[in-house]
Amino acid sequence: MATPPTAATFATLLRAEGLTVVEVGAWEDHNRNHKGPWGPVNGVMIHHTVTKGTQATVALCRDGHDDLPGPLCHGVIAKSGAVYMVGYGRTNHAGLGDGDVLQAVIAERALPPDNEADTDGNRHFYGFECENLGDGKDPWPEAQLLAIERVSAAICRHHKWSERSVIGHLEWQPGKVDPRGFTMGSMRTRVKARLAPAVTYTVRDGDTLWSLAASKLGDGNRWREIASLNHLPDADAIAPGQILKLPKK
């Protein structure tokens, strides 16, 4: 149970996890808060869109449709792995679900079967729609699965949650099948590994966060993850002898 961070902080923590974040319009203030509260938040919910094409998917998730006004989620995770922020606050993504599932998420224990629709999920969950046809045949590129993992881990790390705070829509609302094409169990395993204690490195003369990310993680652009993991307000302020935690490759 937690209070959501500001929209600016939220975007920053996603970028710090190594994600490409695309801010769509005035997403920070685009929400359904006039319909009810958002928060306290208790977990992350993953969906698939049953759409094709990133541009059309983002537009639908931002604007919604006649029967379900937007935003339909907080972020759209494209097949490329980019995350498009379309709203922040209460969004129309979860609907009514099983209160017993919510209690299990709060307690971070195994989920019971979702056999009731008696609890407002839009209040309690961050929601991410993933670009996929949802037919069990449309592929899930590794870049997209990695982005789902990173989004989930970034939020869990911020709130000090475990991987058990990450669920699928199919585990929340009876009759739902999303996300289809991978299991939430496998995704929670990935998130757990990402949240595991990091290895450490002792800074040497001439090191920079970019050079460490390039040499130790294989991607210099992941320097932000090192900065975030070590709570470094100034990415240039490292010194020989300093011990840094390094994220998983």
Image (cartoon, rainbow, N blue to C red):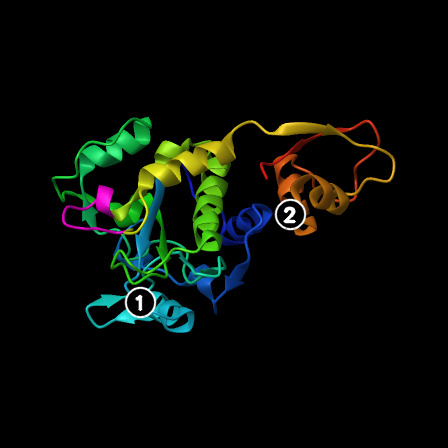
Q: Secondary structure at mark 1?
A: loop
**Residue identifier under label 1:** 51
- Identified at 24% across, 32% down, the residue is 111
Mark linked to residue 222: 2
Q: Is residue 112 visible?
A: yes
Residue 237 x, y percent position in the rendering: 79, 40
Taking 64 as reference, is 167 above or below it?
above
Say which residue appears at 14% left-offset and 46% top-offset. Answer: 174
Magenta part of the chain: 170-178
> Horizontal placement of 42 versus 4: left or right?
left
Q: Residue at x 83, y 32 (%)?
A: 204
Q: Left of 201 or right of it: where is 100?
A: left
Rounded to the nearest angstrom, the CA distance separating label 2 from label 1 is 30 Å
Using a 10 Å C-alpha cutoff, classify the residue at mark 1 as few (fewer than 14 neighbours), some (14 to 19) or many (20 or more). some
Q: Is residue 147 above or below residue 41?
A: below
Q: Quarter-wise, where is residue 64 in the image? A: bottom left
Is residue 14 within the magenta segment? no
